[in-house]
Amino acid sequence: MRIKNICCIGAGYVGGPTMAVIAQKCPEINVTVVDINENRIAAWNDEDVNNIPIYEPGLSNIVGEARGRNLFFSTDVDAAIDNADMIFISVNTPTKTYGIGKGMAADLKFIELCARQIARVATTDKIVVEKSTLPVRTAEALRNILDDTGNGVKYQILSNPEFLAEGTAVDDLMDPDRVLIGGDMDTSEGAEAVEALVNVYAHWIDRERILRTNVWSSELSKLTANAFLAQRVSSINSLSELCEKTGADVNEVAKAVGMDSRIGPKFLQSSVGFGGSCFQKDILNLVYIAKSYGLHEVADYWEQVIIMNDHQKRRFAANIVKTLFNTVSGKKITVLGWAFKKDTNDTRESAAIYVVDYLLNEQAEVVVYDPKVTAEQIYNDLEYLGNRSDGHNRSKVSVVGSAEQACIDSHAVAVLTEWDEFKDLDWSSIYQNMLKPAFLFDGRRLLDKEEKVKLGFNFYAIGS
Ligand code: UDX
Ligand code: ADP
């Protein structure tokens, strides 16, 4: 089966970059990315390709090359569904904020709405691909909705989880460690659908790196991969606190441990805590699923990864308060970096949100600078926590356009995102312009300690 038309529902961090790369690599396939968010689609269609709504190194060039040729962005969801042989579902699956499973289970209402829309609109057979990260056995729910319409349209459901990391999305898509495709391998139609998707990826990826599994293995592998990665960060972060007490240095420990080829060096960078849309959500999902099967020890084991992460964010903020003579009330604290990691404008679950929330509870005045995050996003993130009014947040938090400006007259600076530009700031002049004693808290182990101490800073870095 040759795929000629692809539709992707959801033009977000996953759908946008993934479809751009598929379109670039498969010029004979028409790819239409649809979204109900009109502003988002308008931004993807902006004449100036630098204004696309997602910042990813290399992405605007790819969109520039393929857009209008075989890559289209549209709000006409129905037309794109009906026209497609293959439909990717890349909508958001946030953690539920209400009812059963509140705070843990994934909210599948957006996925279900997509399935119902496909069922209502489709007049020809479709391969439906789960791209969003989903709880195990979501494909079963999709199948139930799609198969019960009685209009004779046949569906194959595949799971093809995305492993791209933000900031390196284009590289991850161009040269992935593996591509995972789960399908109904027991039937010839299922196997044929899997092969159709394999053939899409085989345009640029070696076939040995394209794995075929059953649907449930594919769904669970995605959750497992994220849980393992998050667990490594929580493991090293738990040791950062022990390092601070014992005189060990977490970077030295991480290096020594990571040189064991069985352990490996990646994902051992101690930090103020992991963020991003996936890690916490996926672990909560895993915990919820384990609990729902009565596997309480399994659930508790994975939940501890999140407990540790919350602790890390809280203790970083608490340490700022303690170091500043047990009060930050009325003091100006500068926060450098709001994104959950460098090279992205995504702020979902960013540690900065929680650190600043803590400082605001302690009545600090906060000044934020991030090279890619807008002021509105920062206020939205704080408001989403619901801990105080938007008016209060806006009066206590100011967002400025440069790091140097943000640091003027502040009591303390906290580095919360590892943006490269923070390494090269004129720290000597920043020091001159701060109140004394000047405190510098490095939540990312980004800055050279000796140099900063020499300049006069009271310097604290996580894990040393
Ligand atoms: C992650 C997975 O890496 C990706 O495969 C999956 O598809 C989606 O979730 P992402 O959330 O974009 O990607 O970012 P990632 O690079 O994994 O970082 C997640 C968080 O962990 C960030 O806040 C990062 O700063 C933090 N982190 C990562 C550390 O604190 N230390 C590390 O050593 C690595
Ligand atoms: P992700 O990181 O998973 O890509 P995003 O929130 O960035 O998540 O993107 C998901 C996108 O899916 C949003 O732009 C949202 O508007 C879109 N979306 C959600 N539900 C639907 C739907 N039923 N039809 C079309 N688009 C949808």
Image: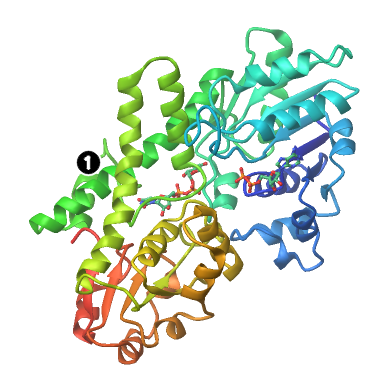
Q: Which residue is mark 1?
A: 260
SS under mark 1 = loop
Q: Residue at x 42, y 71 (%)?
A: 336
324 displayed left or right of 211: left
Q: Position of residue 77 (x, y in %)?
A: 84, 40
Quadrant in the picture for the N terminus: top right
Q: Residue at x 81, y 43 (%)?
A: 32
Answer whether residue 397 is visible to the viewer in this image. no
238 displayed left or right of 1: left
* Farthest left residue in view: 246
Colouring used for the render: rainbow
Q: Position of residue 281 (x, y in %)?
A: 48, 38
Tell me if mark 1 has few (under 14), some (14-19) or many (20+) residues whose alpha carbon lies within 10 angstroms of its own: few
Question: 278 or 96: nearer the eye?
Answer: 96
Quadrant in the picture for the C terminus: bottom left
Classify residue 376 by image quadrant.
Answer: bottom right
Q: Residue at x 30, y 73 (%)?
A: 328
Answer whether residue 220 is visible to the viewer in this image. yes
Type of amino acid under label 1: Asp
Q: Position of residue 98 (x, y in %)?
A: 55, 35
Count of marks overlaid on the render = 1
Question: 435 or 256: nearer the eye?
Answer: 435
Identify whether 237 is placed above or below 320.
Answer: above
Identify whether 348 is placed above or below 126.
Answer: below
Identify whether 2 is placed above or below 377.
Answer: above
Q: Position of residue 226 (x, y in %)?
A: 44, 37
